[in-house]
Image (tube, rainbow, N blue to C red):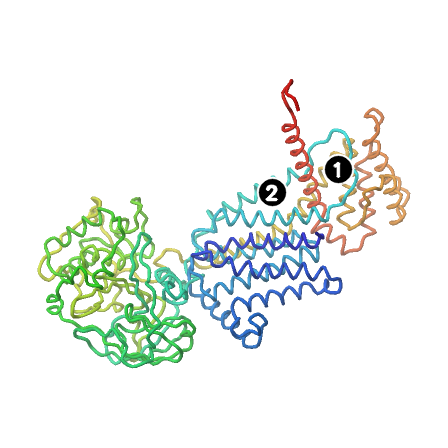
Amino acid sequence: MTSSTRLALASGAATLLACLAFSPVFLTLSWVFPVVVVVGAVVAVSIGARRVPALAPWAPLLELVGGTIALTALYANDTALFGVLPTPSAFGAMRDLLNAAGYAVRTQISPAQSLPELLFLASVGAGLVAVAVDILTVSMRRAALAGLALIALFIVPASAVTDGIGVLPFLGGAGGYLLLLFVSGRESMLRWGRRTGEQTPGFGVRAAQRIALLSLVAGLMLPVFIPQLPQGILRPSGSGSGTGVGTSLNPLVTLAGELTLPEPLDLLRVTANVEDPYYLRVTTLEDYTDTGWTPGSLDDTFDANEAALPGTPSGPTRQVDAEIQVLDQNDRFLATYNSPTDVDADGDWRYDPISGTVWSRDDRTAGLTYRVSAQEPNPTIEDLLDANQLDADDQVQRRFTSLPPIVRPEVARLVNDLTESVQGPYERTRAIMAFFTDRSSGFVYDLATEGGTSGDDLVDFLTNRQGYCQQYAGAMAVLLRFADVPARVAIGYTRGARNAGLWTVSTDDAHAWVEVYFDGIGWVPFDPTPLTAGRGVNSAWEPAVGAAAPTTTAPRTTVAGVDPGAVPRQREEELPISAGAAGNGSSGLLNPRVLLTVVAILLGVGLVVTPAVLRVVVRRRRRERAATGDAHAAWDELLATMSDLRLTWGGAETPRSTARRLAREHDFDAVTAEAMRMLAVAEERARYAPPATRTSDGLDDAVVAVTAGLRADAPSRDRARAVLVPPSILRAGSVSVRTAQASAWGRLRAVVGSRPAGVPR
């Protein structure tokens, strides 16, 4: 295996270890395969190209070509030649993915499911970093600078997650960089005959230990002093589900991100034939497990552009016709009103009648203007009171009242207390909703939810009574299922702000509410979240704030003995729904993004200047030791200076031979030549002569004179590199590591080879 091959493999390994920073960005590990394929392609091309002398100079360009082919095979194979060779159509498809990724980065939060555009972006980033690391390490033999490229893989994930990268990804990236430095230092290390006799451990081991310790402490402690970033730096494109189609992020995560954007984005402009349309629904969450609400699988049987879509409510409805213009959204899901009956949208859009979701595998909403007709449910209170309880074996009843096998007893007791004096599904629904909307219950709207100690998010919310629409809708739907009322969570947008007959929907209007199924009527929406004035819809069948069930009064109930009335709370409608409500907003110099940028720049500058600073420290220490008569320290400083200035030294060359050669090649004057001879004689005596015969006066001055002469004769480029990126630092560390390894193996062999007296071999 050649040196270039080993360096290329180390570069690829370091890049992949740094890519562990993607782990907290994605919900799953689906990013691993494409990233490994792209980085592997870059490494393979690097190794292959450098084995052919004619191709070696073109290796970086060929690596880009190899990475592009890998990306084509992964993401644009249907338009590629033979499935791997890029064509104009393939480049167009990848360009579309990049555009979609740009929108996703601007409008989504993490952790994200494996969206194709986000996987593509991660693969492109990993591939470019792999090429950069390969160029710096293999072509330029400057592995230390490759850390600047590797740190780029940490900056974006660090800004995208709110809970930090995590210890393991950090250690993986740091370990990859150390591996790269070790292999590079080993390959480029000068080999010379080392001194015999007693010697102390070299500076490299101590320096490496200190640097590693300081780096780990800094990396783990910096997040403590950096303010938490507002969510929304990396967020899902729209509010669709990933289950079944694998094309969007967790809708509840999407919802949280849209509500906490630093600046709201206008998403849709709606023209409707009614003055008071209900909310725009994007999808529904139908399955409740121990991990929370998740969407169900989506059916692609029905073409949404066909007339008379199935699933029309059987009860009283009203016709809603709307034209929706997409302003700044790039999603695979169409926002529609409840129970769409007709959709007119360019592209292949599918309709799932169970969830009422209009979605597409291939098309997106960017730049789209579409029309939708819907039969919104419009029952009277009498209609709902007359609705019968569904049979236990009814398909809707079984599906939409299912709960995890183990349920917290506090939740069951709360539902029993709320519904023990009411009858019928609608009365139970009203009683449970009144629990959230009645002022005396003490619920508070806040984008920053309050933690708890119960170990159950639902119980914590019902106890602390602080959260936003995600918690309100999810909790109410769970309580309804406990009460044997079919329920699910709807995700979408409130109707937005009206101006000149148009409704403008922004990210601030992202919302979650509850849909309840009634026999003979269908899915009816209920919104337990108190909203600011003008954002909500006051339906006749929903209890207003402070109202109770139509026939009885819902009891004021607590969870786990907590009395919310003990502490006065601000009402939800008095709180603005904006990014500032989360308490994460900042501006000016205290803006978290500015702080993160400053920290990243400082870390980058620190990474660049660290070798130079360490070189100064090493030089000073060696000269101090040389002043005390340490010939080895003086000779080591000479060799280090030669290494920094790219001057060769043969491993079989004696110190005196080296002195004569340097004096001849660099035309030393008499003073410098004598200083060079003094260093050589002192080194040889320190190696071979008895201690009593060694003389070492004036070695520090001799080192200064010789190294000054070498620098004066070196090109300015080499002098600058010796100051900024001194190779001797890495080589010293590599030698020390190898010495420590040899010592450890020697001790191990001594232990294994030892045996008690009398024991035969």
Left/right placement of residue 156 relative to residue 515 reads right
Label 2 crowd (10 A; few <14 / some 14-19 / many >=20)? some
Residue 669 circle label: none
Q: Quadrant of the C terminus?
A: top right
**Disc 1 to disc 2, how far (Cα)?**
22 Å
Quick one: SS at disc 1?
A: helix
The picture quadrant where one finds residue 399 is bottom left
Left or right: 218 as drawn, with respect to 466: right
Task: Name the residue located 73 percent from the left edge and 31 percent from the top edge.
Answer: 199
Is 335 on the left or on the right of 664, as rendered? left
| Within-10-Å neighbours for mark 1: few <14, some 14–19, many 20+ | many
* Percent x, y of residue 107: 42, 65
**Of 456 and 716, the residue lying toward us:** 456
Amino acid tagged 1: Arg
Mark seen at residue 623: 1
Picture coordinates of residue 13, whole percent (x, y): 59, 52
Furthest-front residue in this view: 760
- Near-viewer residue (84 or 542): 84
Which label's residue is closer to the chain start, 1 or 2? Answer: 2
Circle 2 — which element? helix
Closer to the camera in the image, 454 or 505: 454
Is 646 displayed left or right of 45 in the figure? right
Q: Is residue 692 above or below residue 267?
A: above
Please tell me how many numbered marks the rendered image carries.
2
- In this orientation, which residue lies closer to the viewer: 374 or 472? 374
Q: Read off the residue under disc 2.
A: 211
Q: Amino acid at mark 2?
A: Ile
Q: Work out which residue is located at the far top of the displayed protein and give it.
A: 758
Across and down, in percent, residue 334 comes to 35, 73
